[in-house]
Amino acid sequence: MMKKIFSITAIVLFFSIQTAFAEPLGLPPVPIPADNPQSKAKIALGEKLFNDPRFSSTGDVSCATCHDAAKGFADGPLKTSEGIKGLTGTRNAPTVLNAAYMKSQFWDGREPDLEGQSKGPFINPVEMGLENHEPILTLVRADRTYWKMFRKVFGLKKKEALTMDHVAKAIASFERTIISGDSPFDHYYFTNDKAAMTPAAVRGFNVFLEQGRCVSCHTVSQTHALFTDSRFHNLNVNFNSISGGVKALARRQQQDKADGVDLDVSILTDKAVAELGRFVVTGQWRDIGAFKTPTLRNVDLTAPYMHDGSIKTLEDVVDFYNNGGVVKAGDPVNSFQSGGIRPLGLSDTQKADLVAFLKMLTSPLN
Amino acid sequence: MSIINRRTLLKTGGTFVAGACLPLTNIRLAFADQSQDFTFAYISDSHIQHIKGTKFVRNWDQGLKRAVAEANLMSPKPDFVMYGGDLAQLGTREELDHGFEIMSALKHKTHYVMGEHDYYADLGEYWSSQVGKQYYSFDHKGVHIIVLNSILTDDHWTHERWANGTERMGVMAGLDDPRGSPFMVGAAQRKWLANDLKDISKDTPIIVFSHSPLQKLFKNWNFWTDDAELVQAILQPFDSVTVFYGHVHQIQYNQIGNITFHSVMATAWPWPYPESYAQAENHMPHLTVPINRADPFFERDATGWQYVDINSGKATVKFSLTENEPRTVSYDAKRGHPVDTKYVSRSKPPQNHY
C-alpha cells in the first residue's frame, strides 16, 4: 500500500512544475537556499528563461539547446555541445536532472550553486556568446510579459532594480524542479519490490556494490540514492594528452587566473587547460585532472559519457573501469590517477549485468 | 554556512593555494638570515609490496607515483628530497628496486633514511648497496643536517632468535607483533653523533632525520625509540634542533626543550591515532589535536607527502594530502613550539618529557 502511494506521488511530480515538498522515491528533499525560496510563479519564469533563445548573440541558442528534456536534459549524441555558430567547447553537457543536489556545479565545481552556474553560459564565447549580461537585462526589462513576471516574483518597483541575480534565481528555481527518482531501482531498493528489477540487474547491483567498486563514488544511502559523492577524481580519461607538460601548463593557467583571465573562457576554449580539471579552480595538486562524480540516474539517456564525452556507450564505460581507467587494457595510467581506480577483473557476464543494472536507473518520463 | 560564505570560499579557494605553484613565502623571524632559508620535499613510508613476478600492490605504487609527480611540480624547485624510510614492505630486492625505479622519476637530488621494512630482511645490505651510508651528516645553507638509522635493536634479537632474515622481517613488519623489539639508535651511532656535533657551534640550526620518532610515544606499535632520551641529551645543548620522522603514518608534532618534532605522512596508508585504540595508558603527546584523522571510508585518506620550508632553522611543514585539505604545521616563535595553523589546541601544552 505504502509503495503504491509513493509511486503514484512520484509519477505525478516527475518533471511537473512542483512547489510541493515531496520528492520522488529514492531522493532526499531538494536543498533550497534561504535567499531563493521556491514559488510557482518563479519556477514558471525560470522555465521561460531556460527555453528562450533570445539570450544568445545569434538568437538561436537557449539553455535548453544543450540541456534538452528529450535527451535527459543533456545533449547526446554530441561529445561537446554546439553553441552559437556551431562552435564547440571542451566538455560534455552534464544533465540538469538532479543538479539541484550537487554540492558544486560544472564538471570542475567552479560554481557553488545553480544561481552561479546559470550566469556562465550566456557570456561564454563558445556557448551563447554575449559580451556581457546587459543585453539580457535590456530584453527582459523591455518585454512586457517578462517585466510583469519579474515584478510579481521579486516584488520589484523599478525596471532598473531588475538585475542578473534575479534572472539567475529564477532559472535556478526552475532547475530545482528538474529532479528524477522513482526508477525501477528505487522500487527494488527502497520499497523492497523484488520484482522491480530483472535478475541480471539484481546481479549487476551486486557488482556495483562489491567487485565493481562503483558505489565508492556513486553513492547509495539507506534512505536515498544520488549516485554521486560530489567529490572530484582523476580517472585517467584523457589526461595522457597533457601528462607530458603538466608543470608548464599548470603554471600558465595559474598565472592567467592571477592576471584575471576568465575561468569559464579558458576552460571551454583551451583543451589542455580543460584537462586540468578541478585544479584550475583550487590550484591544489590533489585536484589535477580531477572531475566531479556525475549522477548515474538516467545514465542510459545521457550518452556519450565522461567529462569530454569521449566514451560512447555504457558497455565501453564499464570496460574503461574494468581496465583500471584505460580504454585499452594494459595502457599506462597517469601518476595523478585516483588510487581507487584499478583493474577490476570483471567477467563478461558481470559486465553485462552491471550495464543491465545501470539501465534500471531511468526514471519514468511522465 | 550561508550560501554567500560558501561561494566566497569556493571562489577564493585558488588564491592561497596558488602558493603551491608560485613562489613560496613565509613569515621570517626578525633576525632572519635569508641565506639559511630553503625548501625541501619529504616523501616517506611507501611500503612497496611485491605480489609475484612483475606484480606489485597497485595502491602503494600509485601513492608513491603521485607524491613523486606532485613533488616534480614544485616551483621553485626544492633544494633536495628526503625519503623517510620504509620504501619496501618486506625489504626484498624486488621491492626496493621497484621503489627506487619510481623514485628515479624525481627531478631533484634525493637523500634516504633507513626504515625497518628496508632493513630487517638482510640487515640493510641491499639498501646500502644502492643508497650508501645508513647514517651520515652534511651541511646545507648554514644548517647542519644529520641522518640516523634509528630502527636498530639489540644484538640478541637481531642475530639469535630467527631462522632467517625473512622470518625476522616478518615479525618486525607486524605493527603490533608482540615478538618485535623496541627500536634504538644504539651506542655506536650515539658516539658517532656526539663526535659529529663536537665542532659545530651551538647556534647552528640542526635538523635530524630518523625513521622512528626520537621520542617515546607508544611502545606497542614502536612509535618509540628506546634510547630517545640519550639521543635528545646529545642534541639538547643546541639552540635550535628539528627532528623529522616517518613510521607513524599520521601528523604529529611536539616540542621537548630545544627540540622540535615533526612526523611526516605515508604515501601508502594511514595509521589511526593509537590513543583511540589502546587499552592501556600511553604517551601520545597531548599537543596533537585529534582531528582530521583517517576516514575509514576513504582508503587514500590521510595519506600524502609534504614539503618543508626552513627559515632561520625553524620548520614550516606543508602537508599535501590526497583526499584532504592541505595542512600546515609551523614553529610558533611566541609559544616556543610548533602549531597546526588551522587545528590548534588552546588548552593543552606540549609534552615536556620524552
Image (cartoon, coloured by chain):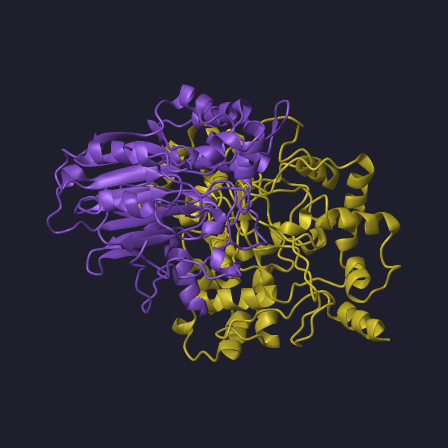
* Hue used for the chain lettered A: yellow
Q: Which residue corresponds to the image point at 51% horizontal and 40% vertical from the top-left?
A: B268
Q: Could you tell me if residue A259 is visible in this image?
A: no
Q: State which quadrant residue A363 falls in.
A: bottom right
Q: Quadrant of the N terminus of chain A?
A: bottom right
Q: Residue furthest left?
A: B31
Q: Which residue corresponds to the image point at 40% horizontal and 56% vertical from the top-left?
A: B11
Q: Is residue B291 above or below residue A284?
A: below
Q: Could you tell me if residue A190 is visible in this image?
A: yes
In the visual, does A57 lie left or right of B194?
right
Q: Nearer the viewer, residue A293 or B340?
A: B340
Residue A322 drawn at (x, y percent): 69, 36
Q: Quadrant of the C terminus of chain A?
A: bottom right
Q: Which residue corresponds to the image point at 38% horizontal and 51% vertical from the top-left?
A: B216
Q: Nearer the viewer, residue B132 or B341?
A: B132
In the visual, does B113 lie left or right of A207?
left
* Hue used for the chain lettered B: purple
Residue A150 drawn at (x, y percent): 51, 73
Residue B88 drawn at (x, y percent): 50, 31
In the visual, does B252 lie left or right of A14?
left
Q: Is residue B223 above or below residue B284?
A: above
Q: Which residue corresponds to the image point at 40% horizontal and 28% vertical from the top-left?
A: B106
